[in-house]
Image (spheres, rainbow, N blue to C red):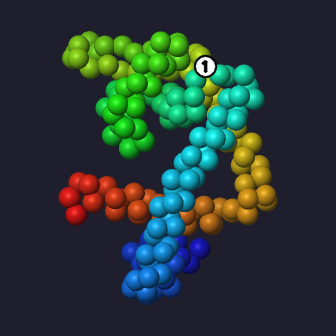
Amino acid sequence: MAAVERAMVGETIGQGGKTHADPEALRGAYLQLLHLVERLHRQLLDVIKDELERLGQTDINSVQALLLYNIGDAELTPGELRSRGHYLGSNVSYNLKQLVDKGYIRDQRSDVDRRSKRVSLTQAGLNVRERLAELFERQLGSVEQVGGVDVALMEQTNKSLQRLERFWADQVRYRL
């Protein structure tokens, strides 16, 4: 918890107050982190795919199910989904069209700007979202005991990932 408290006041997490790491150690840790982030995303999609198959929900894929979960109760534009940083432009357009065609999402043109669409979940989409919420709730029952990941570790990890997200966003935004 001390690492999280140091992070709150701007110190580097994991350095015990030091701000400069060994360049080779930093390089190795950074490259490992990149690999793990990518692998964890794929693993999450595999977990969702397995759950969909277990439920007999074979008409959508794990990416589409996660999109439904992330939309939730909101009414959003496709641009808002992209700006949240979870989806690429062509992927979100393709998946939204598929989900509209399959009856999981409704899209409506804006009354003010006919070029703009807003999307929200149908009852079928809400049902898929609820199944994923149940999956994640089940996982909460064992993530600490079986996975060895407690609240303090999750909070520290979340803080680190939020900092990396901000760092990468700045790399793009300011072309660093």
Q: Nearer the viewer, residue 58 or 80?
A: 58
Amino acid found under the numbered disc labelled 1:
Asp
On the image, numbered disc 1 is attached to which residue? 59
Q: Residue at x 63, y 66 (%)?
A: 152
Q: Nearer the viewer, residue 24 or 125?
A: 24
Does any portion of residue 80 appear in the rendered image?
no
Relative vertical location of residue 106 with respect to residue 95 in this rendering, above or below: above
Relative vertical location of residue 94 with respect to residue 45 in this rendering, above or below: above
**Image coords of residue 123 (percent x, y):** 58, 16
Q: Residue at x 54, y 48 (%)?
A: 41
Residue 90 picture quarter: top left
Does any portion of residue 55 appear in the rendered image?
yes
Q: Residue at x 62, y 25 (%)?
A: 128
Residue 107 picture quarter: top left
Quadrant location of the N terminus? bottom right
**Image coords of residue 67 (percent x, y):** 50, 32
